[in-house]
Amino acid sequence: MDRRQQKTREAIFSAFSTLLSKKNYSKITVQEIIDTANVGRTTFYAHFETKDDLLREMCILLFDHVFSDVLPIENTHDFSEAEDKTGTSITHILYHLRDNHRNILEILSCDSGEIFLKFFRQYLNDLIAKYIVITIPSEIPEDFLINHISGSFVNMV
Amino acid sequence: MDRRQQKTREAIFSAFSTLLSKKNYSKITVQEIIDTANVGRTTFYAHFETKDDLLREMCILLFDHVFSDVLPIENTHDFSEAEDKTGTSITHILYHLRDNHRNILEILSCDSGEIFLKFFRQYLNDLIAKYIVITIPSEIPEDFLINHISGSFVNMV
DNA sequence: TCTGTACCAAACACTTTGTTCTGTAACTGC
DNA sequence: GCAGTTACAGAACAAAGTGTTTGGTACAGA
């Protein structure tokens, strides 16, 4: 990728992040973003379709990093066996959050936090659904349990 | 209150509710609301300051009803004693939700559900914080536990 | 029946959006 | 280092949405 593109992209993400800590997502205008990032209007729309698209791309950037080296938990058909490995994966995520790469903690707890927490939860839900086989004997449907686990973790964060 | 006001207010809420089931909150315009409700632009702004204000008023209307006859749980300084009463209160809320007054279930599970779930959670959080004294011996801070309970309930809904 | 108030329609200044030009600067491959 | 390509800025644009103001109409409550 062209260095100019990288620079511009980074400037826009950075500006967006800065603005998010100051005001609600819905109140932020494209004009403010490009003024803060110091890029032209045309440039913004060359990189992102809309403001919502920027949000989406930002989430992918953020969470792909957080979940990047979370080891797949395979062959865990018994919950008691899986427990430790699950714990390790969760710990990895917490470490990433503590590192606060790209100010993810500020973004997650900002005024528009729900939007990002929603994405966060989707990621986590997929991760749990994919790699953890729950074998606790229960009448509660599995997706219900998965939702409870991911939801509780996100709430905690 | 003037019958005309009641009628207008109801028409706007109804139109708003209808539109919410069709598209995302952020994509709904005031023009669409007043067209669906069949009221004038001036009238809308006489009742609500902005679209966000309408949302806020809608939430108050919805959740005040849901939480209306939830009995205050008092004098429950022991969790085991409180358990039954808490259960009763929660059940009341579930009954209200089942009744689906003003299509609250559709609104909570619509495309913009997070916005309403956020309000829902705030209400529930206040309720739990106010009326339930948790005495489980634990190193976990009380507000953390309260958040976990309210969050889990909302996730379940 | 009368008085006040809620309503409507139309027009308004204003903001924001997303696009389309033209010219300029920077990067990549050779 | 050169040539062709690509990214960028700046400005101007139509289109859509916002919130307000105006003057006139119809209905509610006493």
Image: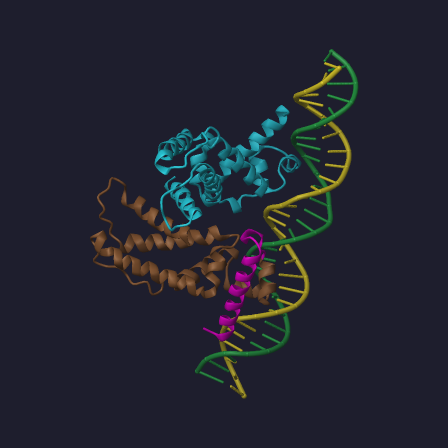
Chain colours: A cyan, B brown, C yellow, D green
Residue A111: quarter of image = top left
Predominant secondary structure, magenta span: helix
- Taking depth in this image into account, of D11 and B76 the one nearest to the observer is B76
- In the picture, measured across the screen, residue D1 lies left or right of residue B77, that is right
User: x and y percent of residue A94 in the render?
Assistant: 39, 33
Q: Which residues are magenta?
A: B1-29
- In the picture, measured across the screen, residue B131 lies left or right of residue C4, that is left
Residue B99: quarter of image = bottom left
Q: Name the image quarter holding the C terminus of chain B.
A: bottom left
- Is residue B10 found inside the magenta-colored segment of the image? yes
- Is residue A122 found inside the magenta-colored segment of the image? no
Picture layout, residue C24 above or below residue B149: above
- In the picture, measured across the screen, residue A144 lies left or right of residue B42, that is left
Give me the residue at 42% from left, 61% from top. Answer: B97
User: x and y percent of residue A127 in the render?
Assistant: 46, 37
Give me the residue at 51% from left, 33% from top. Answer: A64
User: x and y percent of residue A145 in the render?
Assistant: 40, 46
Q: Name the image quarter holding the N terminus of chain B.
A: bottom left
User: x and y percent of residue D7 in the render?
Assistant: 66, 29
Picture layout, residue B141 above or below residue B37: above
Picture layout, residue B7 above or below residue B93: below
